[in-house]
Structures are given as structure tokens and as C-alpha cells.
Image (cartoon, helix red, strand yellow):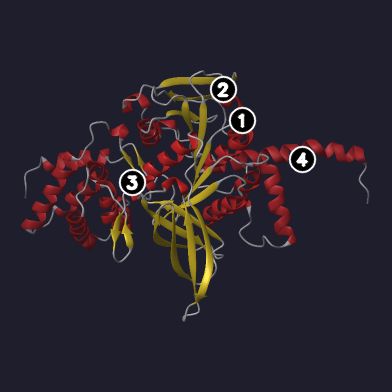
């Protein structure tokens, strides 16, 4: 039966209302602004200028402009993820400012102190107001965009649509389209229709990174944590493959979603991002070109591939490089190599031909006979590596699901980890509640040595308390912002005052 045009148009308001409902529901699902406010840049010793860009009476963009006299107008705009606000960006602000850049950190509508209701539409379509404000500032001469998580979608969209910028850093680049895919039956006509309708109803136009990639030509660095969800890994690799401008991807091995790299690649992460941004601002972005070709079959059914590496900006130096190969099944494989006078080769045995190859310089690496080179590590990254295997049991302790018999073993394992790498204050602070909980349990023991160990842990918990709890930051696989350990440490303080049994 035919539908009269008048009837069709009468259905339009219902369809639009349904779209708005889906949009609102999906926005609430992916945009989860925290209610807490931690620390402003001024608390970090940065001379920051607060700003507010009024969109209308009930909506605004707020944030901080951090000037730098040494920047000569070079300005990095930070785009944070969908579950944080600018008060938690202290580490990004500090390392970028220390590197000689001006930094802009802003909260989208409904985040932090920005007024309004957060939506994915506002996530993108409010950005022209921010960039118009930046273009009016005489102290801003060049822009680079740096996005993390959902912020990387906004940064990529802005790189394509908001006028000239010199560089794009996109870290942990998710796909909202993939989030909308039904769990099962997505290949059926019904599943495809459902996914298509959901995308049409829920997503702003051109928010998908892989759709923006073919039209974006800004030099780009795509940063991927190896342990991120498969869906997000696939999104970043697809975007990297489709990207039109000069680009490369960097795999952070044994690393999860941001800000985990501040622990696993501490020092190297900041230095590589700084080098890329400086070189891009200078008009010569430092990118390692990498390609792979099959050399011969291996006896176990795999094959040897040779990777050709080139980075003209390192001519005259011997430079360590980490090569990453992405296979058709999404798995990632790595090899260590050296560049001599800007070029080098390395072979890697793989079960299938790589579909993408990335490479990144490892600054400060030292030669190693077995592995080619060893990464330069900081006290923080060494300590983080030493305790990495203990986090599942630490979380069990925090959630009171650990078995009583395992408490003393956890204390022993923490001591063994500390023997491998001294715990810096940042880790002591993060583990303060762990020391408190273990101490409270062990000091009840009838064994005098165990009880004494428990009391020592209580003392250690109290000593680990930070002078400024709001500035504590732990970039673990589960990040900590602020200091939720305070209650546990307060109880430890009370327990240690009690006389020993």
C-alpha cells in the first residue's frame, strides 16, 4: 500500500524525536563527566589564565591557557577523554609546558566548569567557537592538536575542519560506530539495518575517525596501547591505514589505555611526543618510515620478513628504533633495530604478512647483545614494572575479596618487588592504603614477627600520605586521580597509636 506524501511528512516529527532520544541516550552512555574537581594548573606552579567562551546563556566552554615566553606562539591544544576534566590533566600540562610550548586545556560543554548538557553533537560542533577564540589571540601563532580517548576523535575532526594546524597526536582512538554494533547478528540484514539506524540516529556526522582520515593531511602520530580493547585497537589501525597526510603509528607494548604510558614509557613517552611536536612546529615532522617484505619461508610454517626503516632527521646518529607489525588478525609483534645515518633493517619471523608497520625511536636506549638494545627506564617505570604482576591481588585486597591466607604472601611479594626497584614517592603514595590494609591484618597475628611487620606497614602507610592529596596521580592500568586512600590511612594512623598486644 502506498503512503501519501502528507502522511510521510506527518511522521517526520516522530522520527526526529526518536533520533533525539537515541542521541541523548548514547551521549549519556559515552560521556560521563566526573563531579569532582582536583587541581588547577596554578597549583602545579603554572601561570595559567582561566577562560570562558560563552556559547549561549546556558552553555559555555571553560579552561586554561598556559602561556610560555619561550614558545614563540607554538601552542598545543589538549582534547581530553569522555570521563575526565581539565583538573586531572596536570601531567600533560606540565610536560608540554616544560618542553617549551603554550598549552590550552578546555572542558567541553557539561564537563568541569563548562555549562550545559554534554552531548556528542556539542563535543564536535562547539569546537569552532574555541578555534575562533584562539585565532583572535595575538600570542597564538601555530597550533598542534593532542587528543586522548574520545578527545582524539574531536582532535582529528578539528584537524580536518578548523583551519591550519601543524600536527596531530591521536592516542587511544576509539570507534563509536563499533560501540553501536549489535553483539550478534551484525552481518544479517536486520543487524545491518539496526546498526545503520543507530549510527544515523546517535552520531554526529563525520565523528568516526576512519571517515575523517582520508581528508586530513596534517602530519600525525597515532599512539596505541597494546593492551587496549581490540575494538579500539582496530579503530586506530584502520584510521592510520586510511590517513592521507604524513603519519606513523607507535605501539606502546605492555600498556593499556591512557594515561598508562606515563608509567610504562615514563620519560620516553614525554620525549617522543615533544620531539614530534617540535619537529612539526619547525616544518619538518620527524616520522620513521617503515615497510616490510617477505624474505623467505621458515621451517615452522611462518616466514621471515625484512623491515626497511628510514628517518632522515637522524642522519649522522646511531638511533634505537622499536618496530611494530600489525597482522591481519589484529595481533601486534615487535622487534628492536638500529638506524645508522638515518636508515636500517631488521628481520622478524611472523605467521602472516603484516598489514601495517610502525616504528618509533627509543631515546636513550643502550646496546644489548641479546635484544639489540635495552630501553632507558626511569625510577618510576622500573618500579611500575616490578609491581605490575601484583595489581590483581592489590585490587582484591582493596575490594576485600582476597583470601586471608594470601595477605602475608602479598606483603612478601611487595617487599620482593621493592628489592628489584626502589619505590619512588608516587608509588608509595599510591600503595598507602595497601600498606594500611595489610598492616591492619598482620598486626593482629599471634606471631610476634608478623605483628611487628604489620605495625611497620601501618607506619609506612601514614608516612606515605602526600602533602597535597589533590595532586596525586597514578598512571596505572587503572589510573588514580586525587587520593582515595585517605580513609584507609586515617584508620592506620589510629591503629598505630594502640599499644602492641
Q: Nearer the viewer, residue 115 or 372?
A: 372
* Percent of width and height locating residue 74: 47, 28
How much space separates mark 4 and mark 3, taking CA atoms? 50 Å
State the mark number for residue 266.
3
Q: Nearer the viewer, residue 312 or 327?
A: 312
Give the residue at x 59% y 30%.
Answer: 127
Give the residue at x 49% y 75%.
Answer: 302
* Percent of width and height locating residue 381: 29, 49
Q: Of circles 2 and 4, which is in front?
A: 2
How much space separates mark 1 and mark 4, taking CA atoms? 34 Å
How much space separates mark 3 and mark 2, taking CA atoms? 33 Å
Kindly indicate whether the residue at mark 1 contacts the one at mark 3 (C-beta within 8 angstroms). no
How much space separates mark 2 and mark 1, taking CA atoms? 10 Å
How much space separates mark 2 and mark 4, taking CA atoms? 39 Å
Q: Residue at label 4?
A: 15
Label 3: how many residues lie within 10 Å, few (<14), some (14-19) or many (20+)?
many
Label 4: how many residues lie within 10 Å, few (<14), some (14-19) or many (20+)?
few
Identify the secondary structure beneath mark 4: helix
Q: Residue at label 1?
A: 163
Q: Of circles 4 and 3, which is in front?
A: 3
Amino acid at each position: 500500500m502506498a503512503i501519501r506524501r502528507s502522511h510521510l511528512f506527518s511522521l517526520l516529527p516522530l522520527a526526529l524525536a526518536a533520533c533525539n532520544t537515541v542521541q541523548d541516550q548514547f551521549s549519556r552512555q559515552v560521556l560521563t563527566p566526573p563531579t569532582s574537581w582536583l587541581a588547577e594548573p596554578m597549583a602545579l606552579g603554572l601561570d595559567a589564565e582561566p577562560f570562558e567562551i560563552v556559547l549561549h546563556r546556558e552553555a559555555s566552554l571553560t579552561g586554561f591557557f598556559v602561556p610560555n615566553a619561550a614558545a614563540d606562539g607554538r601552542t598545543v591544544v589538549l582534547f581530553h577523554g569522555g570521563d575526565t576534566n581539565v583538573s586531572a590533566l596536570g601531567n600533560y600540562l606540565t610536560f608540554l609546558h616544560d618542553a617549551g610550548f603554550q598549552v590550552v586545556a578546555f572542558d567541553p560543554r557539561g564537563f568541569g566548569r563548562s555549562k550545559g548538557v554534554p552531548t556528542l553533537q556539542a563535543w564536535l560542533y562547539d569546537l569552532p567557537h574555541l578555534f575562533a577564540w584562539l585565532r583572535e589571540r595575538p600570542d597564538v601563532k601555530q597550533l598542534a592538536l593532542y587528543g586522548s580517548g574520545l578527545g582524539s576523535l574531536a582532535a582529528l575532526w578539528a584537524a580536518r575542519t578548523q583551519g591550519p594546524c601543524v600536527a596531530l597526536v591521536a592516542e587511544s582512538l576509539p570507534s563509536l560506530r563499533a560501540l553501536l554494533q549489535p553483539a550478534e547478528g551484525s552481518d544479517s540484514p536486520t543487524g545491518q539495518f539496526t546498526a545503520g539506524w543507530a549510527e544515523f540516529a546517535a552520531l554526529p556526522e563525520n565523528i568516526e575517525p576512519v571517515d575523517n582520515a582520508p581528508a586530513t593531511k596534517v602530519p600525525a602520530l597515532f599512539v596505541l596501547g597494546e593492551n587496549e580493547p581490540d575494538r579500539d585497537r582496530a579503530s586506530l589501525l584502520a584510521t592510520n591505514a586510511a590517513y592521507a597526510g604524513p603519519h606513523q603509528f607507535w605501539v606502546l607494548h605492555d600498556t593499556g589505555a591512557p594515561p598508562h604510558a606515563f608509567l610504562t614509557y615514563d620519560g620516553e613517552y614525554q620525549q617522543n611526543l615533544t620531539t614530534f611536536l617540535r619537529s612539526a612546529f619547525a616544518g619538518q615532522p620527524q616520522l620513521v618510515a617503515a615497510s616490510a617484505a617477505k624474505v623467505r619461508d621458515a621451517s615452522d610454517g611462518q616466514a621471515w620478513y625484512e623491515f626497511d626503516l628510514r628517518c632522515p632527521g637522524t642522519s649522522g646518529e646511531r638511533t634505537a628504533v622499536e618496530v611494530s607489525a600489525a597482522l591481519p588478525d589484529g595481533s601486534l609483534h615487535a622487534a628492536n633495530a638500529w638506524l645508522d645515518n638515518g636508515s636500517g633493517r631488521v628481520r622478524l619471523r611472523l605467521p602472516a604478512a603484516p598489514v601495517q608497520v610502525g616504528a618509533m625511536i627509543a631515546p636513550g636506549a643502550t646496546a644489548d647483545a641479546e635484544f639489540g638494545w635495552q630501553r632507558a627506564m626511569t625510577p618510576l617505570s622500573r618500579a611500575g614494572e616490578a609491581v605490575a604482576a601484583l595489581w590483581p591481588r592489590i585490587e582484591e585486597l582493596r575490594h576485600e575479596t582476597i583470601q586471608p591466607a594470601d595477605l602475608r604472601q602479598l606483603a612478601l611479594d611487595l617487599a620482593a618487588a621493592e628489592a628489584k626497584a626502589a619505590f619512588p614517592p608516587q608509588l608509595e603514595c599510591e600503595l598507602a592504603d595497601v600498606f594500611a590494609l595489610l598492616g591492619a591484618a598482620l598486626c593482629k597475628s599471634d606471631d610476634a614477627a608478623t605483628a611487628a611487620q604489620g605495625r611497620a606497614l601501618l607506619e609506612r602507610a601514614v608516612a606515605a600520605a602526600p602533602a597535597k592529596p589533590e595532586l596525586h596521580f597514578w598512571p596505572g592500568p587503572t589510573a588514580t586521580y586525587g587520593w582515595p586512600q585517605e580513609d584507609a590511612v586515617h584508620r592506620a594512623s589510629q591503629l598505630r597509636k594502640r599499644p602492641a598486644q
